[in-house]
Amino acid sequence: MLQHPRPTFTYLGHATVRCDLPGGEVVLIDPWVQGNPACPEALRRFDRLDAMLITHAHFDHMGDAIELAKAHRPKIVVANYEICTWLASKGVESCAGMNLGGSQDVLGLKVTMVRADHSSGISDGDRNLYGGLAAGFIVKLPGGFTFYHAGDTALFSDMQLLGDFYRPELAFLPIGDVYTMDPMQAARACRYLGVRRVIPIHWGTFPALTGTPQKLIKALSDQGVNCEVIGLKPGEHW
Ligand code: NI
Ligand code: MN
C-alpha cells in the first residue's frame, strides 16, 4: 500500500520547529531564530518560507515573525485574532487570524487551534498589549498523519479530549518547567494524548529551564506510559 510521504521536522531550538512538507513547502512553527540562542547559525536563514504558525505572542515564540514575513512573504501567517491584528499593523501581509476550536487550510494542511493554559501578552516597545489567548495547534496532513504542537502550556486534563478527538501520533511538548509543564506533567500529557512519540521542546535554552529529555524518559517509565521520546538537539531532524 502506498504511504503518504511524511514531512521532515527540524528542531531549531526552544519551541521553534521547521516542517519541510513533501511538496517542498516550508512551514515554521513559532518563528524565533535570530535571537534564539539555541538555534544553529546555519539554520537561521531560509531559502523559502511558505507559512508560519504562531502559538502565542511571547518573544520566544514570535520574535522574528515580522522580519521573516517581510523577507519571505509567506502565503499565510496563522495566529490568534489579536496577534494577527497587531502583526498586520506592523506590515505583515497574509495574516489569517483564528481562535480556539477553529480550523484553517494551510497549504493543504488542516490546522486547528486548541487550548493552552498560558498567557499571550504582546511586548511592543515598552508597552504590553493584550495578545488574546495562548494556543496550541493540531495539524492534520493529507493522508491523515496528525501531530500536535502544544506551544507553552501547563498540563490540563482536556488533553484527553484532544487525544480522543484528533488522534495525534506525534506531540511536541514543552518540558522545561517554570513557564510550562515539567517532565512529570509532560509524561501524563503523553498518556492523555495517547501519542506514540513525543519530541520535547522548550528546554535547555536558558538555565531556568531544567527539564530534559532524560527526565521525560524516566517520568514516562515511572508512570508506565508507553511513548517513545525523540530527543532532538537543536538542528537535528526527524
Ligand atoms: Ni510563553
Ligand atoms: Mn515560551
Image (spheres, helix red, strand yellow):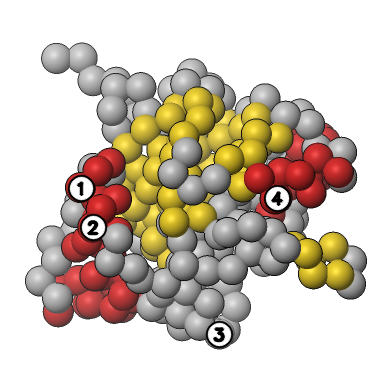
Report if the CB atoms under discs 3 and 2 are less than 8 Å apart. Answer: no
Residue 193 versus residue 89: which sits nearer the camera? 89
- The quadrant of the image that shows the C terminus is top left
Residue type at tag 2: Gln
Residue 139 versus residue 99: which sits nearer the camera? 99
Report if the CB atoms under discs 4 and 3 are less than 8 Å apart. Answer: no
Instruction: State how far apart marks 2 and 1 are (Cα).
Output: 6 Å
Q: Is tag 3's residue or tag 2's residue first in the polypeptide sequence?
A: 2
Task: Count the numbered circles shown.
Answer: 4
Residue 139 drawn at (x, y percent): 41, 38
Q: Which residue is mark 3?
A: 208
SS at circle 1 = helix
User: Is any atom of residue 151 visible in this view?
Assistant: yes
Q: Is tag 3's residue or tag 1's residue first in the polypeptide sequence?
A: 1
Q: Which residue is mark 1?
A: 164
Q: Which mark is residue 160?
A: 2
Q: Residue at x 49, y 48 (%)?
A: 100
Say whether mark 4 is within 8 Å of ligand 1. Answer: no
Q: Is tag 4's residue or tag 3's residue first in the polypeptide sequence?
A: 4
Horizontal arrangement in the rendering, residue 178 relative to residue 5 (left or right):
right
Horizontal arrangement in the rendering, residue 67 relative to residue 195 (left or right):
right
Q: Nearer the viewer, mark 4 or mark 3?
A: 4
Residue 6 drawn at (x, y percent): 35, 29
Q: Nearer the viewer, mark 3 or mark 1?
A: 1
Report if the CB atoms under discs 2 and 1 are less than 8 Å apart. Answer: yes
Instruction: State how far apart marks 3 and 2 are (Cα).
Output: 29 Å
Q: Residue at x 71, y 44 (%)?
A: 84
Instruction: State how far apart marks 4 and 1 are (Cα).
Output: 29 Å
Instruction: State how far apart marks 3 and 1 are (Cα).
Output: 33 Å
Farthest residue to the left: give it: 224
Residue type at tag 4: Ile
Q: Is residue 180 above or below residue 50?
A: below
